[in-house]
């Protein structure tokens, strides 16, 4: 039941922990965990029709993108002094989701080749529908750029052009669009400077976040603070676990990166 405008409960600091910052309390919640579960399940039943398969795979990519950008389920560890169970669950599911996405994209690339060949043989055009393929998210999906993507809604194309356009869309999902300073495009007299996070960019963000998080843990321990805790009050490992191995989260991210690195969209 909602507590409305009532003040949050006072946080009690156990004796001997007065030197530690008080953990933050928040009533905010997100749907990242559920979205990731649904995305992973949908990839296990990838449609055989190319348009539907593209939508399923790209919606899974969007779920991964949104989860990594979310600040609710993975708040800064220096503020909370705890690793929420949702953050650990997200990392584990993402570790399984990225290889599944890479596999789905590879299967879709094969579907596209077969669909193009059949269309050429049948002397027919192919239907391209960007919203039906999952649309665009992030900065490219914002209002100011939407007019430039509306032209790809419900369009019939020659097979060769359809193939190139679909592959370009999938390539953007994998490699992203990274505009360097001074790099821009013009559309309708307006200067556009856009970036779009691809799967490789998202994994790089996970790697950097993990590196910074463990660096913060090391710094807190060196300063004499108790290490942040995870579920069950278990201390979060340092940059390297006591047996010298990398933390589990880094090993999961490494598996995800290797799976995406094997996916090539020329």
Image: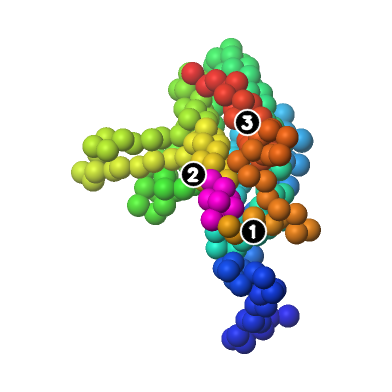
Q: CA distance from mark 1 to mark 3?
A: 28 Å
Q: Which residue is mark 3?
A: 254
Residue farthest to the bottom, as pictured: 6
Do residues under tags 2 and 1 come within 8 Å of each other at their CB atoms?
Answer: no
For marks 1 and 3, the one nearer the N-term is: 1
Vertical order, 233 against 170 (above or below) = below
Q: Residue at x 59, y 30 (%)?
A: 257
For marks 2 and 3, the one nearer the N-term is: 2
Magenta stretch encompasses residue 126:
no
Foreground residue, 214 or 136? 214
Foreground residue, 124 or 72? 72
Q: Residue at x 55, y 51 (%)?
A: 222
Q: Residue at x 67, y 46 (%)?
A: 237
In the image: residue 231, left or right of residue 114: right
Task: Tell me where residue 81 appears, x and y as whole percent.
Answer: 61, 61
Q: Which residue is mark 1?
A: 226
Magenta segment boundaries in residue numbering = 215-223
Q: Residue at x 35, y 52 (%)?
A: 144
């Amino acid at each position: 039941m909602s507590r409305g405008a009532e003040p949050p409960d006072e946080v009690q600091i156990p004796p001997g922990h007065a030197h530690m910052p008080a953990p933050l309390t928040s009533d905010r919640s997100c749907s990242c965990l559920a979205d990731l579960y649904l995305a992973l399940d949908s990839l296990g039943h990838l449609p055989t029709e190319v348009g539907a398969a593209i939508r399923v795979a790209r919606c899974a990519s969007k779920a991964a993108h949104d989860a990594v950008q979310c600040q609710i389920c993975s708040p800064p560890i220096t503020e909370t002094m705890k690793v929420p169970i949702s953050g650990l669950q997200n990392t584990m599911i993402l570790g399984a989701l990225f290889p599944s996405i890479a596999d789905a994209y590879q299967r879709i690339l094969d579907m596209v080749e077969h669909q193009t060949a059949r269309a050429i043989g049948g002397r027919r055009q192919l239907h391209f529908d960007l919203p039906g393929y999952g649309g665009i998210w992030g900065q490219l999906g914002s209002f100011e750029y939407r007019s430039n993507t509306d032209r790809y809604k419900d369009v019939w194309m020659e097979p060769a052009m359809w193939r190139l356009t679909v592959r370009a869309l999938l390539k953007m999902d994998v490699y992203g669009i990274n505009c360097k300073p001074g790099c821009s495009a013009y559309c309708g007299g307006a200067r556009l400077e856009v970036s779009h996070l691809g799967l490789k960019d998202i994994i790089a963000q996970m790697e950097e976040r993990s590196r910074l998080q463990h660096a913060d843990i090391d710094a807190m321990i060196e300063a004499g603070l108790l290490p942040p805790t995870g579920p069950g009050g278990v201390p979060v490992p340092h940059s390297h676990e006591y047996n010298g191995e990398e933390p589990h989260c880094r090993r999961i991210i490494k598996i995800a990166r290797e799976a995406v690195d094997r996916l090539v969209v020329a």
